[in-house]
Every structure is written in structure tokens, then in C-alpha cells.
Amino acid sequence: MHAEEFQSLVDSIGSIGVQNPITLLDGMVIDGWHRYQAATSLGMDCPTVELDDTDPREFVLAQNKARRNLTASQRADAVTSVYEWRPMGRQNNSAVTAELSKTAKELAVIAGVGTRSIEHAKAVHSSGVKAVQDAVKTGAVSVEVAAAVAKLPAKEQKKIAAKGADAMRQAVKPHQEPANAPQIAIAPLALVEEYTELDAARDQIEALQDALVVANIGSSDPDEAAQAKNLIAELRAHIKTLEATLKAVKTSRDGFQNQVAELQKQINRQRREIDKLAGTRTA
């Protein structure tokens, strides 16, 4: 929760107490962490219930699906987190291992997001520092931005995350040279790996294709079938537009990469000439 939301929860619990018990599993809070924190901060008791025989992962996913205010990035993060979790004492259970080894595409269907969003979420979990991971959980930044920041050294990640969400988004934007920068640079050029329009278009296409699969599911209700048919037509049109955008962005990117390669050749030639001149003067 953001600070304002948490304070509202504290005020509410201070007035009427905790209305919905938190859920525990093996003595750990599996749902209701903010309620527990709020009650504890007020010195109040927090009612609890133990999770029954329900699969903990299914329980957590159901709780997250009920929170309709979650962004696509938060859903991708939640599903990735759940399927990375291995229950204590069940490490050698082959059924659990098989369930945990879902593909990114399978997880994307569960979360209702594009496959790339799941891949980004996995990158954040494997390489991102806690502050970067928390920024996704709170919805401060998208999982795509967080994945780009997670490629940096841990020390640099912490430094950027400490400055806030805007700093994280700014950190993954292309570097802009000042208007008065020299036209010929001697330093080597490098393409910075970042989340671009190309990536955004791909994610949107994948998300729409997932929605298209859902919309294609048959319905016995004539009205629902008609709505699904209209949705399919809209999704296909949108996908077609995005694919055209994707092609245009890819062409632009390829042209830029060719320009960079040509500039690198020029720089290499200048380096050789400078080295040659320096050798002549020394002689």
C-alpha cells in the first residue's frame, strides 16, 4: 500500500477494529499483512484464522484476483512470486515440482498478461534488489521498467530506487546528448538495452492475443456470443494496427543501429589516424 492508503486503513481499524481476520499458514501471514501491521501499530489484537487444506498458491491467486485495482504488472509479479514459492517440507514432491515448473506462457494466461510481462517479472525477482521489487508490488512502476533497472549493478539499483519511481523511469530512457555536444566523439558508442516502443508494442499484442483466446471460448447465451464476436473483431483490428506499428518501430530501430555501426567505423578510423600521427611525432 501507498502511505496514504495505509494511513486510511490505520484510521479505520482504530475506529472499528479489524473486520476481516488475517489468514495464517504455519504461523506466517499469507493474507492480511497490512491489516496485521495496522493493528500492531495501534497496539490492538488482530483476529486470525488458519488456512485449511486449500492449496496456498491457489488461495493467494484467488485473493489477488479479488483485488481488481491491481495493475497488469502487479498481477504478473504476484503470479510469478506464487509459482516460485516451494512449500516447506515438500521439496521432493514431484507433483509440486511439476506445478512450479510452469512456462512463462502458462503463467501469462493465469495472470491475464502478455508473456513478456512474466519474463520481466522473473528478471525482477532474480536480479532486482528489494527496493526495485517493492516498486512493482506497490504499482509505483511497471514490471518492464523494473526489469530494465534490475539489469544494473545492485548498488546502482538501490541508488536509483531511493530517488523514487520517476528516477527509475528516467533511468531506462535513452541517453540524450546536449544540443552543443561535439559532432565527432572519440569515445566508443554502445546501444543501451532498454524497454522501447518495440517492446511495448510486443507486450500489447501478446496481451490482446491472450484476450482473443478467452473471447473465442464458446457461449450458449446468444447475447454473450454476440458480444464475444464483436470483441474478437475489435481485438483483431487492434492487433493488426499494433503489428503495423511494431513493423514501423522495428524498421526505425534497425536504421538507427546501422547509423551507430557506421559511426563506430568512423571512430575506429579516426583512432587509427590519431595513433598513426602520434607515432610519427614520436619518431
Image: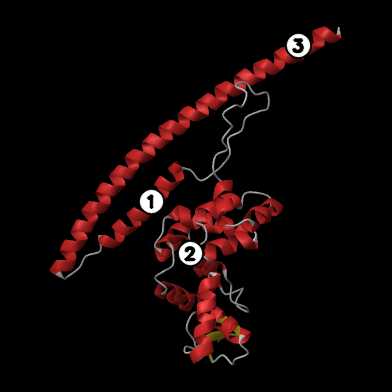
- Relative image position of residue 99 (x, y in whole percent): 50, 69
Which residue type does callout 3 highlight? Lys
Q: Tell me how far mark 2 sits from mark 3, CA to CA.
A: 57 Å
The image shows residue 279 at horizontal and vertical percentages of 81, 11
Query: Is residue 32 something that shows in the picture?
Result: no
Q: Nearer the viewer, residue 122 or 18?
A: 18
Q: Is residue 250 above or below residue 114?
A: above
- Dot 3: element: helix
Residue pointed to by mark 1: 204
What label does residue 74 carry, if any? Answer: 2
Q: Residues within 10 Å of mark 2 (few under 14, many from 20)?
A: many
Report the disc number at residue 38.
Answer: none
The answer to whether residue 243 is left or right of residue 220 is right
- Which is more N-terminal, label 3 or label 2? 2
Tell me the quadrant of the picture where the C terminus can be found. Answer: top right
Whole-number angstrom distance, CA of label 2 to CA of label 1: 16 Å
Q: For the residue carrying disc 1, how many other residues have a C-alpha within 10 Å: few (<14), some (14-19), or many (20+)?
A: some
Tell me if label 2 and label 1 are in contact, CB under 8 Å: no
Q: Residue at x 57, y 49 (%)?
A: 148
Residue sticking out furthest to the right:
283
Residue 192 appearing in the image: yes
Cα–Cα span, label 3 and label 1: 52 Å
Q: Looking at numbered disc 2 in the image, what kind of residue is underneath it?
A: Gln
Which label's residue is closer to the chain start, 2 or 1? 2
The vertical placement of 208 against 110, above or below, is above
Callout 1 secondary element: helix
Question: Which comes before the other along the chain, label 3 or label 1?
Answer: 1
Q: Residue at x 19, y 58 (%)?
A: 229
Colour option used? secondary structure
Q: Which residue is mark 3?
A: 276
